[in-house]
Image (cartoon, rainbow, N blue to C red):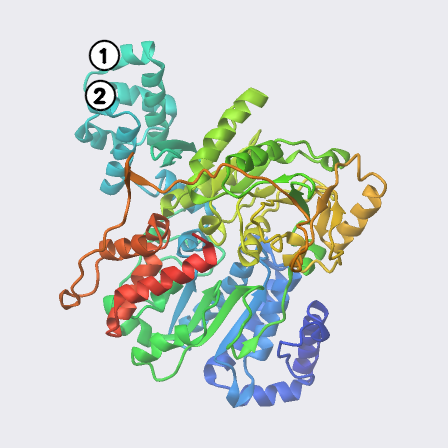
Amino acid sequence: MDAFRTHYRERLLRLREIFPPQENPQAVYPPDRADVFLQQYVAAPALHQNLSRELLTLLDEIEERGGVVNGKTLYDHQWGHLLWAALTLPRGRDAARSVSIEGAPGTGKTLTLGVLLQACVRLQMRGLLGAVAYATAKPYQLSSKVRGDSAGRARILRTPPYEFTERDVRRTYGSFVRIDRYFMRAYFPLAVWRQICAHRPASIETARRELLAHARDGLSLAHAVHDDAQAGMMLTNLAQILCGSATTVRGSGGKPELLSILPPPKDAGMTLNAFTGDAAYAIPRDYPVYARESVGIRTVSPEEAKVALVPASLFTSSLQIQTLGADLHRRIELVLCDEKQRRHHMSFQGPVLSAGAKEPPLVIAAGSQWYEGRGWEQRSPRHSFPESIRRGVLPSIGVRVFPSAEMPHYPSESQEGLDQLTEEFFRTLQYFEQLHLPQPARGNTLLVVHTRLVPIMIKRLRDEFRKRRKEDAQVYGFTGGDEDREALQLWFAEQRDGASVLVSSPAMVKDTLDFPAIRQLLIGARVTPDVLYHLIGRLLHGRDLRGPRDRLLVTQQQFSNSTLSATPFVVLDHRQSFPDDGFRWVPGHALLSEQAFRADARRTAGKERRLEAVTVPPSRRLRKGEESPITRADGAIMLVRPRMQDNEEYIPRRPVYDSTNGPPTPQVIDQWAELYGGKAFSRNFSGVLTVVAGEAYGRREDPEEAVKKKVAKLRERYGG
């Protein structure tokens, strides 16, 4: 007892140092005395006792090896959250069945859940725990969280242990047919391409020789390659695909484009059962795991699984339970959820209970700080943006807004607005020069614009880079698709000379991609404060820093039809105060952290004019009759409704649906989404709407009305 009392006191002191109770009034803290903790412990359910004990033991082992987990050293806040979970789970008979762990984006919540999953697997091996589900609100990130980057590269590039499947053969063939139909049909019919894909060349040069040898008319192809640059480029592109150094993604004009990605490091031990990601590193090979095919690992049937790796939307779907059968859900005793977003804990517990389980599962969910844990029985101490930056977990953030209040503000999605955005992209930041930081246009940039302006901005930036710098910058767009999403994320994370720019819409990327090498978030569209907060969360996953003065940059364009309240100065919890009637701001000045903010204020004092400070308009609402603080100007709006022909406006047709024939098909649901919101909603949210329609059908409600209401909510949140 004396030894445990000392151990408990040390753990409790460390927890309180990391997360002071006075700064976290929303959180429950462990008892001050070890004997009180033990009284609560013995009265708690067996599940809570076992998990608490195993977690404390595991933390001791991690501490003995220097705090390293999956090759990464745990940060203080990760220690704090794990300690907090271990010491607060067994709180007597009324121990919580739902626990919310709250922290800023990019601070390693996935690894925290990975340690919890390791404790669960160890309990399963001793027969003390039933099935466990690991779910994520972002299904497209599940594969990287489970497999890790190296395995992800191998899967995208189809390098060992992954091979070309028949689906891959047809997908790559179809991509190159859309690039150059004559070339592929003349030299590489599908049957020939299938034979070529059966062999993996060791290098691009070897691949070129094999392509020439297998071509239907190799001699003619050799002459074409020698005389025609287009034929030579096609042959080189095919060779890169074959030897595993490139993949294809959807281009801005709809045609596929080649995307070069560094191959994964050679690892002879990598298998389809390898779990190397932060979420699942502790799962042994050949462990009975159930996962979707897209995760890229071998899995067992739901009836045999001890661990289920599933998207949260599928785990909570009654339609999915019918598809899989209730056996898996019935055996779930614990759910770990990465990024719960606005989900209530009953959304996880309800399906398990409806499947026939006697007790609701324990749900431990990690979520970003903007999603409060409402309805959750137990909330952790909060790890905020400023705290993350102060501790060095996240980099400082600089801010640039444009144009200045006295400069013309054009409507969003206007020709003049895009011209202004392009000019600002290439502008030299005087303050970055003073700090000896690379200019934003020379680093990796995530540019968000309206969905229908993505192809326009891609072409414009490529042309501008060639004209201004005589160079071809790497500029790609993301318009959806799991394969493209993972490939672009791997490409963007690579270190390379020159600029890399990814262009997309706010709705596509605000919760989608992590960018380890990002340096600038450039927002050229109207966004709500909520979306801006999420976009900055994408930026905060970037850690490509070069010095103590370095910072990531948020650049936001203001429009004549902007609310102006969505500026970073209003949205972020920056602990600084600004005048309600507007103020001067040096582009690149750090808003986060407080230490960098103060240091920048000293550096820029008296130099505002030379550093090209802008006037930030007031964020408050204008009083009746009050003159606008910004200079408004007219502009030519570029968004035109799509038309079937030049003289015929495109109007979506209402699909014919008969509920007596079963639930609506995905095609019918897409048509409803297009009818009530447009093609962007049918394309970007098809999975969400399929679940909504299926659940409505299961409740004997009108699926069309459910889709209509969901689209209305999505339009309200994302615009459109």
Quadrant position of residue 444: top right
- Residue in the picture at 60% in, 68% down: 81
- State the SS at label 2: helix
Cα–Cα gap, marks 1 and 2: 9 Å
Q: Does residue 552 show up?
A: no
Quarter of image, res 202: top left
Image location (x, y in percent) of residue 46: 47, 84
Of the residues shown, which amino acid type is indicated by label 1?
Ser
Q: Quadrant of residue 419?
A: top right
Is 612 situated above or below 618? above
Count of numbered tags: 2
Name the residue rendered at 41%, 72% in the picture. 124
Proximity of marks 1 and 2: CB atoms separated by less than 8 Å = yes
Residue 193, position as x, y percentages in the image? 23, 29
In the image, is residue 707 above or below residue 648?
Answer: below
Which amino acid, mark 2? Tyr
Left or right: where 512 falls relative to 193: right
In this view, the residue in front, 402 or 498, is 402
Q: Which numbered disc, 1 or 2, marks the residue that appears first in the sequence?
A: 2
* 200 or 511, nearer to the observer: 511
Which residue is outermost to the left?
Answer: 661
Image quarter where the N terminus lies is bottom right
Residue 187's disc number:
2
Query: Which residue is depicted at the point 80% across and 37% down?
Result: 609
Q: Quickly name the residue at label 1.
A: 220
Observer-nearest residue: 181 or 380? 181
Give the crowd class for mark 1: few <14, some 14-19, many >=20 residues within 10 Å.
Answer: some
Residue at disc 1, secondary structure = helix
Residues packed near mark 2 inside 10 Å, few (<14), some (14 to 19) or many (20 plus) = some
